[in-house]
Amino acid sequence: MVMTVKGFVDKKDMGKTLVHEHILVDFSPAEEQIKIDDNLRNEIVEVMLPYLMEIKNLGYSTFFECTPKYVGRDVKVLKILSEKTGLNVITNTGFYGAGEDKHVPKKYWNLSSEDFAKMWIEEWEKGIEDGIKPGFIKTAVNPGPLNEIDKKLIRASAFTHLETGLTVACHTGEERCALEVARIFEEEKVDLSALIIVHADAIENFEVHLELLEKGAFLEYDSIGARPMEYHLNLMEKVIKEGFIDRILISHDAGWFTVGKSKEEQNIRPYTDISYKFIPKLEEKGISEEIVEKLLVNNPSEAFDIRVRKR
């Protein structure tokens, strides 16, 4: 099963899925987050609805919204958009450590991993707001070596997974931190299939991709459209050759409504480059429809299936 903002859905009903996108963000420090009231909420819905309807019309059924708490997460916006579009929208629990940890409130910096995990487990058990529950854990680390806060967040993510079965999607994009995140999961006896290395396509050394894949982690190539298409096509060909296509997730890391800017100032990036540009290029390369189905349907349903995965 997977948990959407409207409740449980069988993973078989996820259909075509975008695993890493954003409806809204607020990059202000945790202590300076802008309160989202009903007027702003309606404005966000008005601006973002057409972009979601476009992917709905392209045949997508499920949308993972990867904005964590203290980076602008607003589950009420997500539920409204889910109801208006019919998309399965999935939100998250967890804290975002990247950006010099400015999105972790300073009052929490001295907490233990167990303390962080307790907060996240409570969101799973009791709901975030209005009974809306998270469907995965989103966290983030700074480039390695990991600092003390990042280590605590990753260990807390492992603890939360073992208690809830929620998959962990961890923002990395740099090889040292990605490998250290994987090592902590191994230390905590969590199977690496419970870990998604977010922004893995930003890791330049392909040998590190292979090391993480061999350990069992999922790799997320989630900047499609933000780089030349040949870059991701080359990655796909390498992964297929090495036999790890079952462990690859793709998305755009697109959107998003920036809280604090007016409607007129928004510069929204659509969620469509995979459909309009990337898949046609895959077909030109002779990559089969079966592989495309794995990338957009089968792999996401396996990666985000809620179940405890122990080593």
Image (cartoon, grey):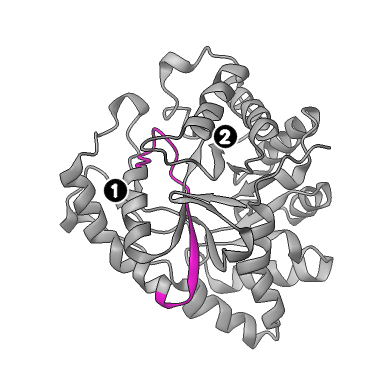
- Nearer the observer, 30 or 232: 30
Relative horizontal placement of residue 235, taking residue 16 as reference (left or right): right
Is any part of residue 95 visible from this angle? Answer: no
* Sequence-wise first label, 2 or 1: 2
Residues shaded magenta = 57-74
Q: Secondary structure at mark 2?
A: loop
The residue under label 2 is which amino acid type?
A: Val
Q: Quadrant of the C terminus?
A: top right
Cα separation, mark 2 vs mark 1, equals 22 Å
Q: Residue furthest top?
A: 110
Q: Secondary structure at mark 1?
A: strand
Residue 170 picture location, percent across and down: 60, 41
- Nearer the observer, 300 or 219: 300
Residue 306 picture location, percent across and down: 65, 46
- Nearer the observer, 19 or 222: 19
Vertical placement of residue 197 versus 189, above or below: below
Question: Is residue 216 rendered magenta in the image?
Answer: no
Indicate the quadrant where residue 154 lies: top right
What residue lies at 45% left-to-right and 26% top-to-bottom?
A: 104
- Count residues near mark 2 (Cα–Cα under 10 Å), then give few for <14, some for 14-19, many for 20+: many
Residue 23 picture location, percent across and down: 36, 53
Q: Which mark is residue 258?
A: 1
Q: How many marks?
A: 2
Vertical placement of residue 95 versus 237, above or below: above
Question: Is residue 72 rendered magenta in the image?
Answer: yes
Residue labelled with disc 2 = 141
- Count residues near mark 1 (Cα–Cα under 10 Å), then give few for <14, some for 14-19, many for 20+: many
